[in-house]
Amino acid sequence: MISILALTTGSVLIIQGMGNLTLLGGTEMIGNFLVVVLVREAAPLLTALVVIARSGTAVASEVGNMRANREIEALESMGINPLSFIVFPRVVGGVISVLCLAFYFIVVGLIGGFFITKILHNMPFSFYSDSLLRAFAKEDVLIFLLKNSFSGMIIFVICCYQGLSVKRSPHEVPQVTTQAVVKSVIYVTVFNLTVTAWFYLNQLKSLGSSNARSTSSYSEYEI
């Protein structure tokens, strides 16, 4: 699923980017366009949605069945903490999985998308790779780690919590699984939007401060 989504997203973005940037005469900005749209936004969000659909539902239903079948009570009677034995490994594994899948999404989307769309444009790979390398910055690594690590944590904490909220009946398992999916999608989307807004507000603030300094320097020079 990640491979298909990455190839499709990368190909569409490259086709749209090259088509519109060529009309504007700015094909050298294709790297910046892909970094902003694919690396910062599409890859973290689409990866999180796939993980929710595939693994989040599995974790919520598995933990819910364990609670309904009193397996968790059996662990507690043996002196085993369910949080450290059931929840913590799934959260850590989920964070690592989301990070790896998001990195894989980016690689497949950028490289695979280029070769798929090669028949539609004559852009050399050396020009494409150089544009991408110039577009990447340390802020992109920070956003990548922040969005994907916390998205993985949010997904599996919510899914485990919803699974543990089952009382006695196995009929509650589908209900808590649905609630886990809905809450995970909402919280992950809001978190990604918050990080994006925070990052661009900081960029605008830094641009404003730099403009203010340049204006003040210009005024002192005139005086």
Image (cartoon, grey):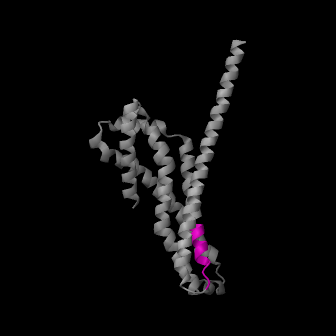
Q: Quadrant of the C terminus?
A: top right
- Residue 182: quarter of image: bottom right
Prevailing secondary structure class for the magenta stretch in the rendered image = helix
Image location (x, y in percent) of residue 162: 59, 74
Q: Nearer the viewer, residue 170 or 85?
A: 170
User: Is residue 140 visible in the rendered structure shown here?
Assistant: yes
Determine the image quadrant of residue 130.
top left
Q: Is-magenta flag for residue 98? A: no
Relative to 201, is 125 on the left or the right? Answer: left
Residue with the most extreme top position: 223
Indicate whether 99 appears above or below 78.
above
Q: Is residue 147 above or below residue 26?
A: below
Tell me if residue 100 can be seen: no
Answer left or right for 171 relative to 11.
Answer: right
The magenta stretch spans which residues? 156-167
Question: Residue at image x 60%, y 86%?
Answer: 168
Asked if residue 157 is positioned above or below residue 13 in the image, the reply reads: below
Task: Pinpoint residue 65: horizontal percent, then vertical percent.
Answer: 54, 82
